[in-house]
Amino acid sequence: MEKIDNTFGKIKDSLEIMHLFKNGITIMFGGFGGVGSPPTLVDMLIDSGASGLTLIGNDAGFPTIGIGKVVCEGLAKKLIASHIGSNPIAGRQMTEGTLEVEFNPQGTLVERIRAGGVGLGGILVDVGINSEVVTKNKQFAKVEERNYIIEPSLTADVSIVYAKKADPYGNLIFDKSARNTNPLVAMAGDITIVEVEEFVPLGGLDPEEIIVPGVYVDYMIQSKGVNWTWVWDPAYGT
Amino acid sequence: MGMGSGIRNLIAKRAAQEITDGMVVNLGIGIPSLVPNHLPKDIHVMFHAENGVLGMGPTPDEGKADENLCNAAGYPVTLQIGASYSDSTIAFGMIRRGKLDVTILGSLQVSETGDLANWIVPGKRVPGMGGAMELSQKAKKVIVLMNHCDRDGSPKILPSCTLPITTPCCVDLIITELAVFEVTPTGLVLMELMPGATLEMVKRKTAATFTLSSDFTIE
């Protein structure tokens, strides 16, 4: 690999940033059913031993895939997500009362994250306005004769993100449908750590193609690649 | 499901008739995912996936799967020409903005006024709503493909849903292995019988009241 200048000091060795994972913090993660979740950062989070975490992200992954690994280790006390159906362990923890789950309609959840990332207090949305699970403890607003739920924005102590390419400033591009929630999660972390598949020099990304400007990125580590077996792989579960 | 692939494809084939040139369509998992196999070759449809793909193509050939190009169920797909990627907010922005012509999804129950119940079985299964609320509340047309009855033989088309509702009054069309129903402002209307089904059968297995379409004919 070409030596990349660490001009902004953002590129770190994983041991240098391990201390950022602390007990009881809120962690936002990128990915959708594990696709686009950062495998190396997920393992680091588990190795850090941090527990009592509040996790915010699209879903609970699969038991051996993505954030599902963290959930299955019992490190989370709360999960804010739209779906946990692909991780039966998360369902069991919820039933047993060891994991509190807050369900959001998916589009609302990701827009709440985006709102957090762009400095808004919340969003007005009418999705699920007739559903008690969505409206519980929420305020409402009437704008031009239309009723909306006031959905508060979401931020996190630490965001963990997976990117295809990054330059030393932290300008990011993603890979196909692995983009999903990553750009939003990257913006909403008080501290944002990005796992990068490939570092390129400054100027190595066309400014037109950059999805997340590096101003949102605090630290980056080199990805070791996906180390789980995907559900569609015949080897899954063997 | 307990439903043979022949019947599943029959339902998917009927659903495919609802799709016309130029539409933007979101397909749920299960039977809805079979719908593209039954579309005419010359039709141009953009398949939307809520994980950020507009213009999804068929399953890749064996060995050609890209782990970072998947549908909302997490399975590898391909792209059709003219496709685009987006982040999740844009994928849902399209839905809320009314850009989705049709959503085809499965359900646990549907009421005679078109209430959809497909996100939770309290005490048993709590998968979460995922994108179902946006899709069912905001797509221009909501088509439900499902078994006529559940595993215990209880009707799934009911006067009102007994399970928690995902979205009220949103379903436009119900296609089962027995029948095609349209949800209209004046109630449920039986449009067609599926091959092999009889009116008696449908009456016996449908708890909701329904009327017969004016052009309903028993073949």
Image (spheres, coloured by chain):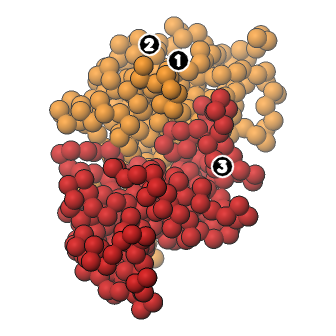
Chain colours: A orange, B red
Q: Residue at x 41, y 11 (%)?
A: A47
The answer to whether residue B218 is visible is yes
Who is closer to the viewer here, B88 or A219? B88
Q: Residue at x 42, y 32 (%)?
A: A61
Who is closer to the viewer here, B55 or A3? B55
| Residue B215 pos. (x, y %) | 45, 90
Residue A227 circle label:
1
The answer to whether residue A160 is visible is no
Query: Is residue A51 toward the left or the right of residue A7 in the image?
Result: left
The picture quadrant where one finds residue B194 is bottom left
Q: Quadrant of the C terminus of chain B?
A: bottom left
Q: Residue at x 42, y 62 (%)?
A: B145
Crowd rating for badge 3 (residues with CA inside 10 Å; few <14, some 14–19, many 20+): many
The picture quadrant where one finds residue A60 is top left
Which chain is home to disc 2? A
Which tag is nearer the camera, tag 1 or tag 2? 1
Q: Which residue is mark 2?
A: A19
Q: Secondary structure at mark 3?
A: strand
Which amino acid type corresponds to the residue marked 1 in the rendered image?
Asn
Residue B57 circle label:
3
Which tag is nearer the camera, tag 3 or tag 1? 3
Which amino acid type corresponds to the residue marked 2 in the rendered image?
His
